[in-house]
């Protein structure tokens, strides 16, 4: 049978989610223990296209209860360096969990457990939160966003938040050879292999306000008013990508997942309701193919940095760029190196993030994984560069 994806559109996130969920043919869910996994990994307010709108989560909780589910927990594992309690408060999840009487858990507070990836070439196993043992169904509720490294981030990529603590960053540090990756980036391959053991049972994509351009955190909010629901995560991601103006086959991790037999991304083989859903297509600006910094006196050497390092660097420069003149090199430019494969940066550069530690003799090293803008500032301010 063809995978089914329901799309709804409306102004109100709660009502639009309800409309989509009401049309969906749920299996019997009585007795299920369900984990709802939104995207709440950052400190961001609702409606900015960065984190899942809490009303989408609220509508999901209400619907699951109507289906007889008693055991519902909302959980997230935030980015390394983000305080989960602060993130839950800011994203509105804390309030919703209290109003709805549902437990809200920081997945990284639990121990880790290893999960083998039997067919993994790049990833043989991953560490996940041991909290997952308590659930037999996972609902992934991502935001519809572009992503600097994976083009889009949707329900499959959202499952990366189930990885335990720094395991999330490890996926960004892997290297693969050509025989293994057939030209794809190691990160895309790693996400597709992770998905072989961490597919959601239900996907609800929050496209009420998405993000275009430099996602997942520094792009522009994009109002869409869209919700997608499916039990086939890969097909839901493919339809969402299409509504964002991208061909699903052009998104490497979706293509790799389909090649691994995890689902259908050819739109003509997916049952999409309503049939004329493309009337709601609203193309997103793609992520920049090259990372550009709007400061002519800053040279960035990005060799394999993950989005967390890039995001930090953008925030840091926005706030502290004017204070960095003491770090000019002879060419009156500040040279900054980031990323795990860093090699090219000149002597005297600022080397940001733990990945650059192997080059630390070359300049001023600031640790952190991911690094934090205020920590970079406090390390640099008051420190004078050796002549
Ligand atoms: S130091 Fe930066 S690039 Fe390296 S793994 Fe950490 S966040 Fe990613």
Image: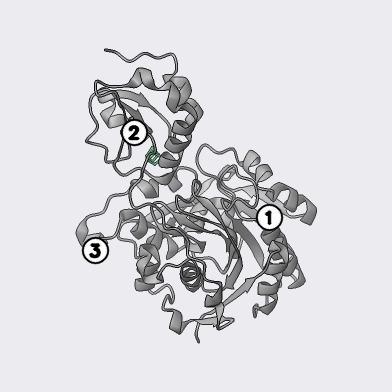
Q: Residue at x 61, y 55 (%)?
A: 52
Q: Distance of mark 1 from mark 3, alpha carbons? A: 40 Å
Q: Which mark is residue 296?
A: 2
Seen from the viewer's position, the closer of residues 209 and 2 is 209
Q: Secondary structure at mark 1?
A: helix
Horizontal placement of 118 versus 341: left or right? right
Nearest-to-viewer mark from 2 and 3: 2
Q: Residue at x 42, y 59 (%)?
A: 194
Mark 2 Cα-neighbour bin, 10 Å: few <14, some 14–19, many ≥20: few
Horizontal placement of 329 versus 196: left or right? left
Q: Which residue occupies the extreme left position in the image?
A: 179
Seen from the viewer's position, the closer of residues 108 and 289 is 289
Horizontal placement of 31 versus 196: left or right? right
Residue 58: x %, y % from top left? 72, 60
Which picture quadrant has residue 269?
Answer: bottom left
List the residue tagged with mark 3. Answer: 182
Which picture quadrant has residue 327?
Answer: top left
């Amino acid at each position: 049978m063809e995978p089914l994806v329901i799309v709804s559109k409306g102004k109100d996130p709660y009502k639009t989610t309800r409309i989509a969920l009401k049309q969906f043919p749920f299996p019997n869910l009585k007795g299920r223990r369900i984990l709802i996994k939104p995207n709440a990994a950052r400190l961001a307010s609702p409606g900015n296209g960065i984190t899942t709108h809490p009303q989408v989560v609220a509508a999901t909780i209400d619907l699951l209860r109507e289906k007889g589910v008693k055991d519902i927990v909302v959980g997230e594992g935030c980015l390394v360096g983000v305080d989960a309690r602060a993130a839950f408060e800011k994203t509105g999840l804390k309030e919703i969990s209290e109003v709805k009487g549902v437990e809200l858990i920081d997945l990284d507070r639990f121990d880790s457990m290893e999960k083998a990836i039997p067919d993994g070439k790049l990833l043989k196993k991953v560490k996940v939160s041991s909290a997952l043992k308590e659930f037999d169904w996972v609902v992934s509720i991502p935001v519809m966003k572009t992503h600097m490294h994976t083009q889009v981030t949707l329900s499959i990529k959202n499952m990366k938040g189930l990885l335990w603590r720094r395991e999330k960053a490890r996926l960004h540090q892997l290297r693969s050879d050509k025989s293994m990756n057939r030209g794809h980036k190691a990160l895309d391959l790693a996400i597709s292999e992770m998905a072989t053991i961490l597919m959601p049972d239900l996907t609800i994509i929050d496209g009420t306000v998405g993000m275009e351009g430099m996602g997942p955190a520094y792009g522009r909010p994009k109002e869409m008013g869209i919700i997608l629901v499916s039990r086939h995560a890969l097909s839901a991601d493919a339809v969402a990508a299409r509504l964002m103006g991208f061909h699903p086959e052009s998104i490497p991790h979706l293509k790799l997942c389909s090649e691994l037999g995890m689902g259908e991304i050819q739109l003509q083989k997916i049952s999409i309701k309503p049939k004329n859903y493309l009337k709601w297509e609203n193309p997103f600006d793609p992520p920049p193919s090259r990372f550009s910094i709007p400061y002519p006196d800053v040279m960035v050497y990005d060799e394999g940095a993950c989005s967390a390092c890039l995001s930090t660097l953008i925030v840091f420069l926005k706030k502290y760029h004017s204070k960095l003149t003491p770090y000019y090199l002879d060419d009156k430019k500040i040279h900054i190196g980031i990323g795990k494969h860093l090699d090219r940066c000149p002597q005297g550069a600022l080397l940001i993030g733990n990945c650059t530690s192997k080059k630390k003799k070359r300049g001023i090293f600031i640790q952190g994984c991911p690094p934090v803008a205020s920590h970079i500032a406090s390390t640099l301010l008051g420190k004078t560069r050796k002549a």
